[in-house]
Amino acid sequence: MFELGGDGPGAILVGVDGSETSLRAGSYAAGLARRQGARVVVLFVHTPPGAGILTAGLIEVQRQAQATVVDELRAEVEHHARLLGLSFAFYERHGNPYLELIRLADELRVDAVVIGASMRAGHRLVGSLATRLVRDAKWPVTVVP
């Protein structure tokens, strides 16, 4: 049985980290949401530092850098959402980006996930966040180059 008026996504989750591909993913999600009348859910995941840089000073530098990126992203999202007349929510989580994207998608029952493709060379060999989401997700996943 088909639902009347339920022919498109109601909520689109997009993962952003400040990279060029994540910003393109955000733009793509905003355009899709505008055309479909959907809500955009933006997620930034604060990632812990790598094991090789576990000094207090470097941890603080990374924390401050991520906080700056979040502030800039939040302002940009708010500005563009206002211009496009979009409904949006901005979330911050801490931990593993893959797990946090899945958790938030499940919590909010989103209809689609948009993510930027990884530009790291090593991800071609061991896989990337986008590859794992496409393989494991319960919702449509769009990977933006």
Image (cartoon, grey):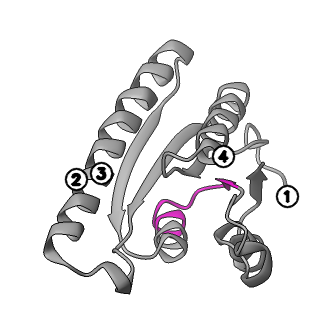
Asked whether the beta carbons under mark 1 and mark 4 sit within 8 Å of each other, the answer is no
Residue denoted by label 2 = 64
Q: What amino acid is at disc 4?
A: Thr
Any part of residue 137 in sight: no
Residue denoted by label 4 = 21
Secondary element at tag 4: helix
User: Nearer the observer, disc 3 or disc 1?
Assistant: 3
84 vs 18, nearest the viewer: 18
Secondary element at tag 1: loop
Alpha carbon distance from label 1 to label 4 = 38 Å
Asked whether the beta carbons under mark 2 and mark 3 sit within 8 Å of each other, the answer is yes
Alpha carbon distance from label 2 to label 3 = 4 Å
Any part of residue 2 in sight: yes
Residue denoted by label 1 = 1
Disc on res. 31: none
Dot 3, crowdedness within 10 Å: few (<14), some or many (≥20)? Answer: few
Residue 143 in the image: state x and y as whole percent.
Answer: 76, 55
Dot 1, crowdedness within 10 Å: few (<14), some or many (≥20)? Answer: few
Disc on res. 65: 3
Dot 2, crowdedness within 10 Å: few (<14), some or many (≥20)? Answer: few
Sequence-first tag of 2 and 4: 4
User: Nearer the observer, disc 1 or disc 4?
Assistant: 4
Determine the residue positioned at 32% across, 53% down: 66
